Amino acid sequence: MSGNKKGFRQFLAIRGMGAAITAFIGLIIIYVAFGILNPKVFSGQNVLNLLRSMSKYLLIGIGQSYVMITGNIDLSIGSVVAMSAMMTATFMTLGINPFVAMLISLICGLLIGVINGFLVGKFRLPPFIATLGTMFVGRGVAYMVNGNRNTDNIGITLGKDVGDRFQNFFYYNKTLGVYNTFWIALIIFLVFFFLLSKTRTGRHIYAIGSNVDAARLSGVDVISTTIKTYLVSAFCSVVVGYILCAQAGMGNMEAGNTYEMYGVAAGVIGGVSPLGGSGLLLGTFAGAAVWQTLENGLNMVGAQVGIQRIVIGVIVVGAVLADAVLRNGNGVQRKKK
C-alpha cells in the first residue's frame, strides 16, 4: 500500500498535474450541474456536438499552450485560422485539388510561425508586439486572397462530390460513432502531448519558460526551440482553418476572430501558466472541455451571450489569479528556507 501511495504522490507531483486534475473535476461538476438544469445536456447527440465543437478550442489551446509555457504568447492564431480557411476555400473554388490547396495554406501558415519565432527568439521582440504585427498581416492576407470578399461554395468548380468529401472528412462524417473533427484533434493532441512530455525539445520548452537565461547558459538553443513552439501554434491554427472551411463550405474572412484568446482561456483554465515554465497539455484538454461545456450548458439553459462571456471571463481571471497566488506562495516558502 505504501508503494501505491508513493506512486500516487509522484503522479500528483508532476508539474501541472494538480491543476489538470482540478480542471477535470470542475468539468464534471459543471456538466452535471447543467444536466440537472436541462436533461437534454446529457443526450447523446449533445455530447457528440460538444466534442466536435470543443475540438477547435483544443487545437488552438495546444498551440497557445506550447507558446505560453515558454513565457510567450501568440496573438496571430485567429488570423492564421482565417488565412487558412480563406486560402483553402479560394484555391478550391479556382479548381485546385483540395490536398494541394491545403498544402499551400499549411506552408503559408507555417511561414507565419517561423516569422513569429524569429522575431521573438532571435531578435527578442516582445511577443505581444511581434505577434500583433503578424496578426494584422495574416488577417490582411485573408482579406486579399479572394479580393476582399468571402468565397463561393468550395464545390462550385471542383464539383459537389469533391466539396462534400472535404466537408465530410473534416466536419460532418463520423468514425466509430464520433465526429471526425474530434478524432483529428485527439490525434494531434496525443502527438504534441508526447513531444512536450517525453522529448528533449519538450524539456527545453519548459526550461525556457522557467528561466530563459539559465536555459541559454545550459546549452538550450532558445531560438530554435522558440520557433518550434510557434510552428506548433501555426500548424494547429491551420488545421482549425480547414475545420471552419469544411463547416461552412466556404471561406469567411472573419473566421477565427478572437480565437487567440480562446487558446489562452483553454490553457490557463487547465493550469498552463501564462508566466511560463509550467502546465500540461492534459490540462489544456480539460480547459478546452470546460470552456465548451460552459458555452454549451449556458446556451442550453437559455443564458444570454453576454452572461456567457462574463462567466467564462471570470473563470479565466480566477485561473490566472490562482496561478499567481501559488507562485508567490512558493516564492515566499523558498525565501524562508
Image (tube, helix red, strand yellow):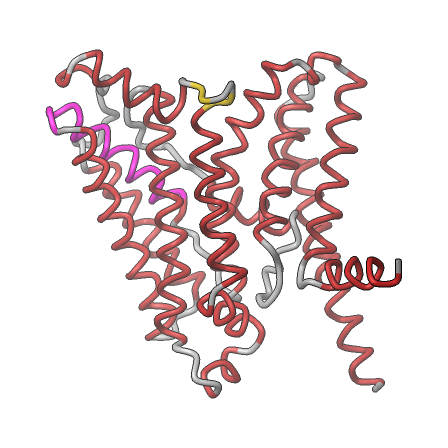
Q: Position of residue 283 (x, y in %)?
A: 63, 49
In front: 314, or 112?
A: 112
Residue depicted at 16% across the width and 23% down the height: 93
Nearest the viewer among 12 and 176 is: 176
Q: In the visual, does 34 lie left or right of 84?
A: right
Q: Main secondary structure of the magenta part?
A: helix
Considering every residue shown, the one lying at the far right of the view is 1
Residue 52 image offset from top left, x and y in percent? 51, 26
Q: Quadrant of the C terminus?
A: bottom right
Position in image of residue 288 (x %, y %): 59, 39
Q: Residue at x 52, y 40 (%)?
A: 58
**Quadrant occupied by the N terminus:** bottom right
Q: Going by the image, does 155 lie left or right of 204?
A: left
The front one of 92 and 77 is: 92
Which quadrant of the figure has residue 149?
Answer: top left
With 308 as the anchor, is 96 left or right in this view?
left
Q: Is residue 93 magenta?
A: yes
Q: Residue at x 47, y 35 (%)?
A: 56
Percent x, y for residue 196? 50, 59
| Residue 101 in magenta stretch | no
Q: Is residue 118 above or below residue 93?
A: below
| The image quarter in which residue 123 lies | bottom left
Name the residue rendered at 68%, 24% in the picture: 298
For the record, the magenta segment spans 78-96
Up/down of 312 relative to 229, above or below = above
